[in-house]
Amino acid sequence: MTEPVEEVSREQTAGNPQALPASGRQALAEWLPPLAGAPLNEASRDEAFDGAIRVMAAVHDAAHRDLRWNTVAVPFDRVVAPAVMGARGDVSTASSNATHEATVTSAKATSTTGSSDANPPAHAAAPHASASTAECAGDAARETRIRLAAAARYTGTAFVRLRESQAMQAAADVDRHEEGALPLAGMPIAHKDMFARAGELSECGSRVRAGHIAPETATVLARLDAAGAIDLGALHMAEFAMSPTGFNAQLGHGRNPWSQDHVSGGSSSGSGVAVAARLVAAALGSDTGGSVRLPAAICGVTGIKPTQHLVSVAGVMPLSPSLDCVGFLATTAHDCARLLSVTAGADENDPLCRREPAQDYAADIERPVHDLVVAVPAFGKNDPISDDVLQLLNAASETFARAGARVERVPVPDLTELGLLANVVLGAEAASLHATGLASYPEAYGAQVRRRIERGLLYPATRYLDALRLRPIMLQQFLAAYLPQADALFLPVLPYAVPTIAATTIGTELDIEQRFGGMSYWTRAINYLGLPALALPMGFTENGLPNGFQLVGRLNGEAALFRLGHQYQLLTDWHTRTPPPLDV
């Protein structure tokens, strides 16, 4: 039985981490490293203690409020009623025995010979002018050559490696196929440097993985290859996918294509830059706390974070397997739908991959949205949104009414607790994955990344399991409160205008991390809930840089999100805007 004084001290510490006395901190410093299995960085040890205490207190409060003694940890979606799945019946699915290959075949009928990238604005540079898919024999090789030449100018800012010979060979193979035989024929793409390709480097933005040659090819890359996409190379990313700004102590900062002094967003930094600069039509990214949606909004492109486990993560670097999602950045919602159509589906190499029948997400994308409902919170001055972002949000939300969707008002979600629960899951799982590395070569990690991972070593197993047990409960509560009769919840992505690199790197390590937390306030909780989210550009803030919003859907509700996103982009032109050419 726990003595009352122990419970009181925990509650006092939760409200004020500094209440932990100096003697207690010294004791922690002595006995925690052996338990954690790795030395703690002395320079940030106290901050790690304080942060861990805050997060553990939040889990304690939620568990005390919502868990029963016999609530077990199960996959987050297994106890959710069927009523909250999908988009209220408007999703067109293949037959129950449909194979992934059959879905790829059906996608051919709905993929156009070009996409919205086929008609870029008049001020676009030469490599921007081509369609995202080849239109006739010989087009793939010609287009690939043009894109590779443009991409070479962005080596170090968007790309870390180009696959010139492999890409040209793939393009030649595409050109030998009959027109219409491949759903993504000739589409130039690139991948975040954490997706494995057999026999090629996969370094994950880190010194720890420098020189690593992948033994296998990620399932998602193999499916894109089979659909005719041309992979131009590996993209810049935050170290081990652990920065919302694109910061990388090893490779240098991700730099915004609209302004080299501003952040690119992360951790899929190169993905956002490459798509915005029209070096590629689409890019692979990952999203564990916003890493697809943030660079999409910050660079002015479209990004899809699918339902948890909808796309296989086999051959993809794990950060937090309970939260990790493979996603895409592209110019349009339509292209995101096409990409998801050829990559989603069961994979024997990923036991967690969802088993629902595969879908052609672009099949009904042109349908009017009169049957869809968008839930729009009544944002106000006290919400974590700056005035200029709020102005853009108001204008964007009105567009859905003009498109014919029904708009309903809902309360503004408080995502603080959900974000802290996500932190526990991510921290514990990342610490488990990196414990050996931290113990063996801690100096190989960047200081920010090391400190964030070390904090996960301090979380007790009970709190981690509480966070997993709470997940389906929190999901049901969230859906009941904000998506009871709606197909999409309209939320910001970034709470303020895109910051400068300087503004995100000055101050103490704690100051920097707190800015990180604020930057992903609107995205991190969605990963904990496992819901799909489509990020869309909505204009420019007063500093002249892009910003965006996200449509959060029900589980497996991507088709409704794509329909809404497509209609929004038919009525706006933000997705057609391109940054000035890179000055090198």
Image: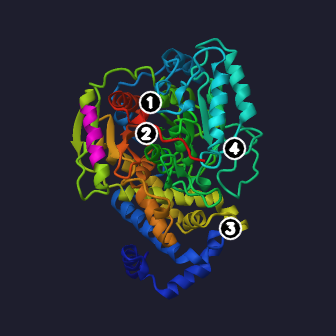
Residue that appears at 30% across and 44% down: 393
Residue 395 covered by magenta stretch: yes
Amino acid type for the residue under numbered disc 1: Pro
43 and 459: which is toward the camera: 43
Q: Mark 3 points at which residue?
A: 442
Amino acid type for the residue under numbered disc 3: Pro
- CA gap between label 1 and label 3 equals 48 Å
Q: Which of marks 4 and 2 is in front?
A: 4
- The answer to whether the residue labelled 1 contacts the one labelled 3, judged by CB atoms less than 8 Å apart, is no
Other-residue count near label 2 (Cα within 10 Å), few / some / many at <14 / 14–19 / ≥20: many
Other-residue count near label 1 (Cα within 10 Å), few / some / many at <14 / 14–19 / ≥20: some
Of the numbered discs 1 and 3, the one sitting upstream in the chain is 1
Which numbered disc covers residue 532? Answer: 2
Magenta span: 391-401
- CA gap between label 3 and label 4 equals 26 Å
Q: Provide the secondary structure element on which disc 3 rests.
A: helix
Other-residue count near label 3 (Cα within 10 Å), few / some / many at <14 / 14–19 / ≥20: some
Q: Mark 4 points at which residue?
A: 161
Magenta region's main secondary structure? helix
Residue 3 sits in which quadrant? bottom left
Q: In which quarter of the image is the N terminus?
A: bottom left
Q: Name the residue under label 1.
A: 121
